[in-house]
């Protein structure tokens, strides 16, 4: 098998720079040309006008189509003969890969909105690297699966690749070697619009879209929807995208600093989550502690957990799409602490594709687990090295309640109705995945984050903690203590829930798609005129 060597990348670098017609110095300048940060142009989706109007930077010729003053009517909008055209179906190409479950979930949530707002649309989800890439790019998915299970290796790779020289090198190297193949795949689908929901799918495919636009004499708009929350890899942020959709101020600052993306191409919105969450948030009345919300939650509990007392709080444990994390240990500690403290609860564990864990939880002898753990010293089971936000004091021995708590443990496989389970729950325990955090916020669910992937997920922890609906703890014994304390303070949980509701943005996917659809239709009109 022929494997291009990484080290002599200087040759590639030279060739790539020559091929791409830019000098090394101008590339540095390109990355650094951030400009004065004028936030006045910044669009906030919820307030933005999603009609057929483009921003100043769109008044540039793109692939044959031109937006100039003559294209605009008196209202400053593109003149369209048949208004029905604006709602016509679109061919949408999503760029994503199964590195974690979040990118696919976001693409699917956007796809669903295209079908709602632009009926008859069709879409394809393309992982450009697996079919069109050379080594090492084509191994993106298996490499991620391996590295995400080894956080130390992942941390080194993430931080090394998140530097400017690496970014430039990789952008040019991958474009030089793979852009032609990517362009061919894009041309085969012949999209009206390309939407990237993956950090590794921006630079090279954007160049392909530009080349195809020139070739066909029509502009194919390229949008990036960032599916991270608190931090993001530099490769997310490109300067020349049609629009860049961001879910937090933290990402906005990164986009300005790392991508130099102009304000009028940045749209502040929420993270796109599945339509189910919009439906469930509405059914909860956007307040899970209102009488209406509580009644709906009870109905959902009766439906999902038949035979379980619907008045008991539900603790939902998720390990991400792949079911990773020290779930088993956490459940053991949680069960023991709640039983000893006399707190009734139902523990639902989403094991993802980890069937072994699911079977083990459903068949575990829980009384012997709690007897064994209760006999030991909790502090001896604490981790020596923990990623605390400050040091926590030693745990006090549990004061055993006269009446043991009635605790049920239910192991579940991969679920497609996570939104309902989140509605049924009182507290979520999860790794700090951006999708999961945004989903929890949308239905007002407080979250205790139990692990994070170094690099892109560290900022998610800060985001949830700063916004007041989350806390971080990676020690199973302490996790159990925190959860039991929260359950003993309903007012605290309620306050966290309200803060989560305030941050949640269940309509984000719909707003993003209406914006993208509107701009794409505008370009379709201009492309026809060209
Ligand atoms: N998920 C799901 N069913 C499951 C477990 C997880 O649909 O049984 C979804 C979850 O709702 C979320 C996604 O998988 O949308 C995980 O995405 P996140 O961004 O939180 O983490 P990632 O897996 O991408 O690292």
Image: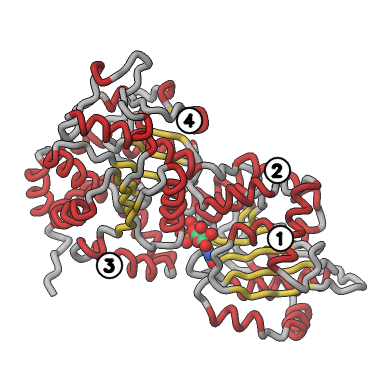
- The residue wearing badge 4 is 44
Which residue appears at 37% of the width and 28% of the height? 52
Residue count near mark 3 (Cα–Cα under 10 Å), binned few <14, some 14–19, many ≥20: some
Marked residue nearer the N-terminal end (3 or 2):
3
- The residue wearing badge 3 is 139
Return the residue found at the far top.
74
Q: CA distance from mark 4 to mark 2?
A: 22 Å
Which residue appears at 50% of the width and 42% of the height? 508
Badge 2 marks a residue whose secondary structure is helix
Q: CA distance from mark 2 to mark 1?
A: 20 Å
x and y percent of residue 36 in the render? 35, 23
Q: Quadrant of residue 38?
A: top left
Q: CA distance from mark 4 to mark 1?
A: 34 Å
CB contact under 8 Å: marks 4 and 2: no
Q: Is mark 3 within 8 Å of ligand 1?
A: no
Q: Which mark is residue 498?
A: 2
x and y percent of residue 379 in the render? 71, 70
Badge 4 marks a residue whose secondary structure is strand
CB contact under 8 Å: marks 3 and 4: no
Q: Quadrant of residue 485?
A: bottom right
Give the mark toward the camera: 4 or 1: 1
Residue 235 visible, this angle: no
The N terminus: image quadrant: bottom left
Give the mark toward the camera: 3 or 4: 4
Marked residue nearer the N-terminal end (3 or 4):
4
Q: CA distance from mark 3 to mark 1?
A: 41 Å
Marked residue nearer the N-terminal end (4 or 2):
4
Is 373 drawn above or below residue 208 in the view shown? below
- The residue wearing badge 1 is 300
């Amino acid at each position: 098998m022929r494997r291009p060597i990484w080290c002599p990348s200087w040759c590639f670098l030279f060739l790539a720079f020559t091929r791409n017609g830019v000098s090394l110095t101008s590339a540095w300048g390109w990355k650094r040309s951030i400009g004065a940060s004028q936030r006045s142009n910044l669009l906030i989706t919820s307030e933005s006008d999603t009609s057929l109007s483009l921003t100043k930077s769109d008044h540039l010729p793109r692939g044959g189509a031109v937006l100039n003053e003559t294209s605009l009517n008196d209202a400053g909008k593109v003149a369209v003969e048949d208004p029905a055209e604006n709602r016509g179906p679109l061919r949408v190409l999503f760029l994503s890969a199964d590195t974690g479950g979040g990118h696919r979930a976001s693409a699917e949530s956007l796809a669903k909105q295209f079908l709602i707002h632009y009926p008859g649309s069709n879409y394809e989800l393309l992982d450009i690297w697996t079919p069109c890439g050379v080594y090492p790019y084509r191994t993106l998915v298996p490499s991620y699966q391996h590295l995400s299970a080894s956080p130390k290796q992942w941390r080194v790779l993430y931080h090394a690749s998140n530097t400017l020289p690496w970014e430039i090198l990789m952008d040019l190297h991958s474009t030089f070697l793979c852009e032609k193949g990517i362009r061919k795949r894009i041309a085969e689908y012949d999209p009206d619009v390309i939407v990237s929901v993956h950090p590794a799918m921006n630079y090279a495919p954007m160049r392909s879209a530009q080349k195809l636009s020139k070739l066909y004499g029509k502009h194919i708009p390229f949008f990036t929807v960032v599916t991270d929350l608190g931090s993001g890899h530099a490769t997310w942020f490109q300067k020349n995208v049609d629009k860049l959709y961001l879910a937090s101020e933290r990402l906005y600052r990164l986009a300005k600093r790392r991508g130099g993306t102009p304000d009028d191409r940045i749209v502040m919105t929420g993270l796109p989550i599945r339509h189910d969450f919009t439906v469930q948030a509405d059914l909860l009345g956007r307040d899970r502690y209102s009488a209406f919300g509580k009644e709906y939650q009870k109905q959902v509990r009766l439906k999902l957990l038949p035979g379980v007392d619907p008045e008991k709080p539900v603790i939902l444990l998720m390990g991400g799409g792949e079911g990773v994390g020290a779930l088993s240990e956490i459940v053991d500690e949680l069960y023991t602490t709640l039983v000893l403290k006399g707190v009734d609860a139902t523990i639902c564990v989403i094991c993802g594709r980890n069937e072994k864990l699911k079977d083990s939880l459903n068949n575990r002898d829980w009384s012997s687990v709690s007897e064994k753990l209760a006999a030991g010293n909790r502090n001896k089971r604490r981790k020596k090295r923990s990623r605390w936000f400050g040091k926590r004091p030693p745990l006090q021995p549990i004061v055993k309640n006269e009446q043991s708590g009635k605790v049920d443990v239910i192991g579940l496989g991969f679920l497609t109705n996570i939104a309902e389970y989140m509605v049924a729950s009182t507290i979520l325990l999860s790794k700090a995945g951006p999708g999961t955090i945004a989903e929890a916020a949308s239905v007002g669910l407080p979250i205790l984050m139990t692990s994070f992937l170094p690099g892109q997920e560290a900022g998610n922890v800060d985001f949830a903690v700063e916004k007041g609906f989350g806390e971080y703890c990676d020690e199973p014994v302490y996790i159990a203590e925190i959860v039991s304390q929260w359950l003993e303070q309903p007012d605290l949980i309620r306050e966290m829930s309200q803060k989560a509701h305030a941050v949640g943005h269940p309509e984000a996917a719909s707003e993003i798609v209406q914006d993208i659809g509107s701009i794409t239709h505008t370009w379709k009109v201009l492309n026809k005129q060209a």
